[in-house]
Amino acid sequence: MAFNKEIYKDYEETLQTIVKELLAKPSPSGYGHEVTQYILDLLSKWGVEAYRTIKGGVIAHIKADPHKAEDITEGGLLLQAHVDTLGGMVHRIKGTGRLKITPIGGLVAANTEAENVVVQTRDGKTYEGTFQLENASVHVNADLKTQERNWDTMEVVLDEDVIDAEGVKALGIESGDYVFFEPRTRISDKGYIKSRFLDDKLSAAVLLTYVKYLTDHKVGLSRDLYIHWTIYEEVGHGGSSPFFDGVTESWSVDMGCVGEGLNCTEKQVSIAAKDSGGPYNYDVVNKLIALAKTYDIDYAVDIYPFYGSDVEATLRAGHDFRHALIGPGVYASHGYERSHLDGAMNTFRLIQAYLEDK
């Protein structure tokens, strides 16, 4: 199999378009209608069989080429990426007209200070604001520099003329309304991608880009391919759904970690050997490493001590298959994250090599 670099350049541009569109659609865990409809519309446009699950995710099925699958004993491969993100929910309305919120997923309060937010009511009204430390002016608060940033000391300040709880309630805002944090997406001319929620919309975009490549070039696969875009990964049960007869292998395609003591950079595809759920499948990891070496795909192998993935939720739900975790390196996870187009395209290439190399 030859890798055509001109083709990759074309699909790098496709990936940029898709990831910007995904990041522009708010989707904290449990709120997935807009982003999943976008995915369904793309797949329909490309002629790919897909549907929304009862739980709210999206599953696409690309059937094996019967001529290539005749002598293949491997079963289907299920790839999973999540399009849910961190976010917030209104916990209570304060007497001052400010909002206390509760985090969705592992959002860190200190990483979100002074971020723009949108509060969306259950009937679809939206209101802008910022997430601030209480008494946030340095000219007023003598303890500003040392005050702890947590969910008890921070609040949403609405950009509305409200000074009490009654005024906020008159807007239609109630406990349980979603709070969306602005992603602030930037892609530099050097290929760096900065945004909240690259975890895991960058990998979700990689999978969509790979599907487009398959359909554009009418690539026949030797095994059935299922792709699941989940919407509850950040709260632990995105991948815990019933799946398909014949699937013998599943991967999470999710961010690789970049940080002290790790090998991966933003320009590489990460192959996880182990995370907090234990080791990934020995044979699959070995094959991924061998293919990366064969096709000169820039990769790193790492161990993540504070990490869980969709595929582990799938295994805990009782499914029996080999499992793996790969994805582009992402720095500052759960904050204002940074990756690189090279890392995304190296992930694309590794998936391609695994499915198409014979």
Image (cartoon, rainbow, N blue to C red):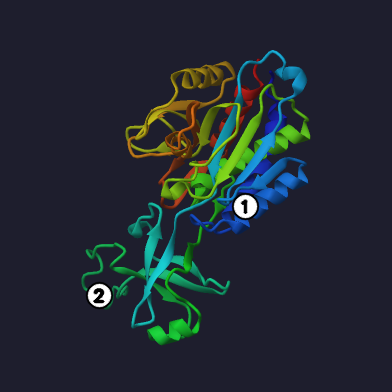
127, 298: nearer the viewer: 127
Label 1: few (<14), some or many (≥20) within 10 Å?
many
**How far from the left and from the top, in percent, is residue 331?**
43, 43
**How far from the left and from the top, in percent, is residue 354?**
60, 23
Q: Is residue 172 left or right of residue 304?
A: right
Q: Earlier in the sequence, mark 1 or mark 2?
A: 1
Q: Secondary structure at mark 1?
A: helix
Q: In percent of the image, x 72 and y 15: which residue is there?
A: 70
Quarter residue 297 falls in:
top right
225, 119: nearer the viewer: 225
Q: Which residue is mark 2?
A: 141
Number of on-image labels: 2
Q: In percent of the image, x 77 and y 18: which residue is there?
A: 67
Label placed on residue 36: 1
Quarter residue 276 falls in:
top left
**How far from the left and from the top, in percent, is residue 65?**
75, 24
Q: Is residue 358 left or right of residue 336?
A: right
Q: Amino acid at mark 1?
A: Thr
18, 315: nearer the viewer: 315
The C terminus is located in which quarter? top right
Label 2: few (<14), some or many (≥20) within 10 Å?
few
Calculate the distance from the C-alpha at mark 1 to the C-alpha at mark 2.
Answer: 44 Å
Q: In percent of the image, x 69 and y 19: which residue is there?
A: 2
**How far from the left and from the top, in percent, is residue 140?**
26, 78
The label nearer to you, 1 versus 2, is 1
The N terminus is located in which quarter? top right
Taking the view exactly as shown, the residue that stands out farthest to the top is: 71
Q: Amino acid at mark 2?
A: Asn
Is residue 267 placed above or below 114 in the rendered structure?
above
Q: Secondary structure at mark 2?
A: loop
**Can residue 191 be seen?**
no
